[in-house]
Amino acid sequence: MLQFDVLPVTPFQQNCSLVWCDKSLEGALIDPGGEVERLLGLVEKHNVTLSKVLLTHGHLDHVGGTAELKKRLQLPVIGPHKDDAFWIDGLEGQAHMMNFSTPEHFQPDQWLVDGDRVSVGDVSLQVIHCPGHTPGHVVLFDDQSQTAFVGDVIFQGSIGRTDFPRGNHQQLISSIRDKLFPLGDDVRFVPGHGPFSTFGQERVSNPFVSDKLFG
Ligand SMILES: [Zn+2]
Ligand SMILES: [Zn+2]
């Protein structure tokens, strides 16, 4: 069964999730945006052994600690979809824009596509390609616990920005309404920033994607 704990990192308070299998205590960090020491403290607190880093998309506040983790712990980096390669290749420019120190460069060891599965011990996360905020954004969904790690696709009461290069508002709406909402109203999600919610709650009250706007 999947367990998880969330630690907001960077000045953007990006929700990095530590996910693990409660049987094997094998774990993964989803979107380690920075503050690697604090993240490793969380890993230690839960007595988890990391086996990989998972990335939802290529924005710096989500990937900034990746190169350091990869180097220190020899962890494979998995995701996002290869359409986000231009964001990862452009980390220096992102650092400049966000006023972050320049991070080390890295290359993912494996790009993800829609329908892939990623194992963390006995947990099998389903990969859902959800372009719009970035073209290569993926969501990681655990069917068993009905939990989704959605990065910057949807937030409680809001949706991801689409004013970045290759952002696409229509595509984002379609990703949310046609790919995420059908997973079920009871699915709780951990967004890249801010509080958790459920898809059912957002169908009712989200001012960008609620059912009453699209009924
Ligand atoms: Zn983002
Ligand atoms: Zn973000």
Image (cartoon, rainbow, N blue to C red):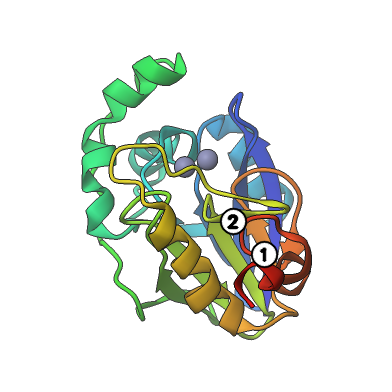
- 22, above or below 51, in the image: below
The answer to whether 53 appears left or right of 201 in the picture is left
Provide the residue designation for mark 1: 189
Residue 100 in the image: state x and y as whole percent.
Answer: 45, 17
Instruction: Please tell me whether mark 1 or mark 2 is closer to you in this view.
Output: 2
Residue at 29%, 38% in the rendered image: 165
Residue at 76%, 49% in the rendered image: 195
Looking at this view, is 93 or 144 the one in front?
A: 93
Residue at 68%, 73% in the rendered image: 211
Mark 2 secondary-structure assignment: strand
Residue 55 in the image: state x and y as whole percent.
Answer: 42, 53
- Tell me which numbered mark, 1 or 2, is placed earlier along the sequence: 2
Q: Residues within 10 Å of mark 2 (few under 14, many from 20)?
A: many
Residue 103 in the image: state x and y as whole percent.
Answer: 35, 24
Quadrant of image for the C terminus: bottom right
| Discs 1, 2 touching: Cβ within 8 Å | yes
Provide the residue designation for mark 2: 154
